[in-house]
Amino acid sequence: MDFEIIGQIRDIETIAVGRAVREVVRLRKRYGRGRWRKLKGVATVRLRDDTVHTAEVHWYEAHGIGRREMKIKFPLLD
């Protein structure tokens, strides 16, 4: 990751569950079987250059496996 999450992720929403997750086959091969979900939320992040921003964050998650492949979709206006 090119960023660090500072504090908690808020306003969490589920985008897709199970086979609706486009990457589910790849996720199962890499991390194992599980009920994969794609989620999004808003968090304060510190970028590699030490600047701090509020950004929308997306990630995949499965019970017993945890959060995987977090990414920033776009920084929000501070």
Image: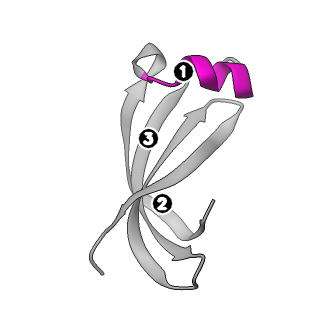
Q: Are marks 2 and 3 in contact (CB under 8 Å)?
A: no
Q: Residue 13 appears in which quarter of the rendering?
A: top left
Q: Residue at x 54, y 21 (%)?
A: 24
Of tags 2 and 3, the one toward the viewer is: 3
Q: Is residue 68 left or right of residue 59?
A: right
Q: Is residue 32 left or right of residue 11?
A: right
Q: Which residue is mark 3?
A: 39
Is tag 2's residue or tag 3's residue first in the polypeptide sequence?
A: 2
Q: Which residue is mark 1?
A: 24
Q: Residue 56 appears in which quarter of the rendering?
A: bottom left
Q: Residue at x 47, y 18 (%)?
A: 18
- Inspect the image, locate mark 2, and give the three-letter code of the amino acid beneath it: Ile
* Residue 39: x %, y % from top left: 44, 41
Query: Vertically, is 5 above or below 24?
Result: below
Of tags 3 and 1, the one toward the viewer is: 1
Please tell me whether residue 26 belongs to the stretch shown in magenta.
Answer: yes
Q: Magenta region's main secondary structure?
A: helix
- Inspect the image, locate mark 3, and give the three-letter code of the amino acid beneath it: Leu
Is tag 3's residue or tag 1's residue first in the polypeptide sequence?
A: 1
In this view, the residue farthest toward the left is 77
* Residue 67: x %, y % from top left: 62, 43
Q: Which residue is mark 2?
A: 9
Q: Quadrant of the N terminus?
A: bottom right
Marks 2 and 3, how far apart at CA: 11 Å
Marks 1 and 2, how far apart at CA: 23 Å
Q: Is residue 49 left or right of residue 20?
A: right
* Residue 50: x %, y % from top left: 58, 85
Query: Which residues are the magenta region?
Result: 21-30
Q: Quadrant of the C terminus?
A: bottom left
- Inspect the image, locate mark 1, and give the three-letter code of the amino acid beneath it: Val
* Residue 63: x %, y % from top left: 64, 29
Of tags 1 and 2, the one toward the viewer is: 1
